[in-house]
Image (cartoon, rainbow, N blue to C red):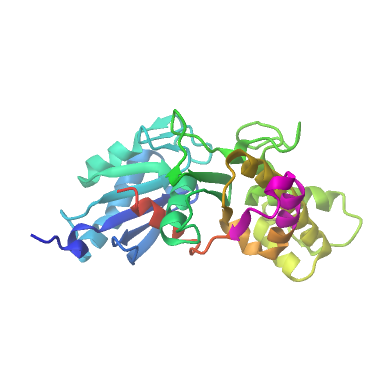
Amino acid sequence: MATDTKDTDLRIGVDLGGTNTKYALITADGDILEKGRIKTGDYPDAAAFVDGLYDQLLPLIEKHNAKGKLKGIGIGAPNANFFTGNIEHAVNLKWKAIVPLAKMVSDKFGVKCVLNNDAKVAALGEHTFGVAKDMTDFIMITLGTGVGSGIFINGNILYGCRGNAGELGHTVIRHNGRVHWSTGLKGTVESYCSATGIAITAKEMLENAEIESQLSQYKGDELTSKAVYDCAMKGDELAISVFKFTGTILGEALANFALFSSPEAIVLFGGVMRAGDLILKPAQQSFEEHLIESYKGQIKLLDSSLNLDDAAILGASRLV
């Protein structure tokens, strides 16, 4: 007998971030029926978080008549291990050590739950619904509070022997450079090219500035990457220099990544990419300058085609 796809193939996609957790009820075709969000930091431990997520999702499941027919729940999270279903030592979450989140969610909801790294999940969303839909080899770089990556090789996500391959944000791009605020590593890509890194760069440049800048109106934590963007859009020379500096470092890093897997494209995604050409143009120039001759002009740098709020939840929904 034919299966009613609308009833049986509904999935829940969850994008668990350090600040917010976004979720949605999604059809097999990728149509988002309903979505919402909760504050991750409001929950002191993973058990409380799972309870809070359940309280939010149960009404959606019942509203769309999917209870008992739900195919499963997919979750993208930082430092998530696809092989074990655990979040492992996530530096941007309150919950330290090992958290068996997939089992906890599955037990609470009574359905299958699959957990994967947030950047890998975003790459899966891009591969299924975005600009990388017809690509077998590409790299997805997520530029937000941190820098993550998902790598597709021969049509499959690269996991490595322990499931955590592709932590490109923690690779070193500046020897003995800026100390990372969580890992203690020096000179990593995330230290410079994340939203956090952009804010730090702006503060450093402002301290040594010989020109006036609108950035000086922001004090302490008020000087965010968004503040830098706002000033840059008003023509502030120093703010524009912050993005040029960041894009140059990003381009160098992307050239290293390209030499590793020879992708058809590198897809850039995340809040930092709202800066558009302010960061993309210097990144493109630096990228080409740091490639060997046989790679020049062969690899596309693309901005993600997916909505910033939807890519990870769409990708997560494809885990089940």
Query: Residue 97, image x and y in percent?
Result: 45, 29
Taking 104 as reference, is 265 above or below it?
Answer: below
Along the horizontal axis of the image, is 180 left or right of 74?
Answer: right
Q: Looking at the image, which residue is at 69% across and 55% down?
A: 297
**Picture quadrant where residue 277 is located:** bottom right
Residue pictured at 38% horizontal, 51% vertical: 316
Residue 163, magenta (yes or no): no
Asked whether the viewer can see residue 246, the reply is: no
| Quarter-of-image position of residue 129 | bottom left
Q: Is residue 299 magenta?
A: yes
Residue placed farthest to the right in the image?
Answer: 210
Horizontal and vertical percent position of residue 175: 76, 32
Q: Is residue 253 above or below residue 312?
A: above
Image spot of residue 77 (x, y percent)? 44, 44
The quadrant the N terminus occupies is bottom left
Count of numbered badges drawn on the protein: 0
**Residue 219 image point, x, y percent:** 73, 55
Q: Is residue 185 left or right of residue 36?
A: right
From the viewer's side, name the closer residue of 135 and 246: 135
State whether residue 262 appears in this view.
Answer: yes
Residue sitting nearer the eye, 242 or 123: 123
Q: Nearer the viewer, residue 20 or 132?
A: 132
Q: Which residues are magenta?
A: 282-302
Q: Is residue 160 above or below residue 240?
A: above
In the rendered structure, the answer to whether residue 182 lies left or right of residue 201 reads left
Determine the residue located farthest toward the bottom in the rendered image: 234
Residue at image point 70% right, 33% down: 186
- Of residues 9 and 242, the one drawn nearer to the viewer in this rendering: 9
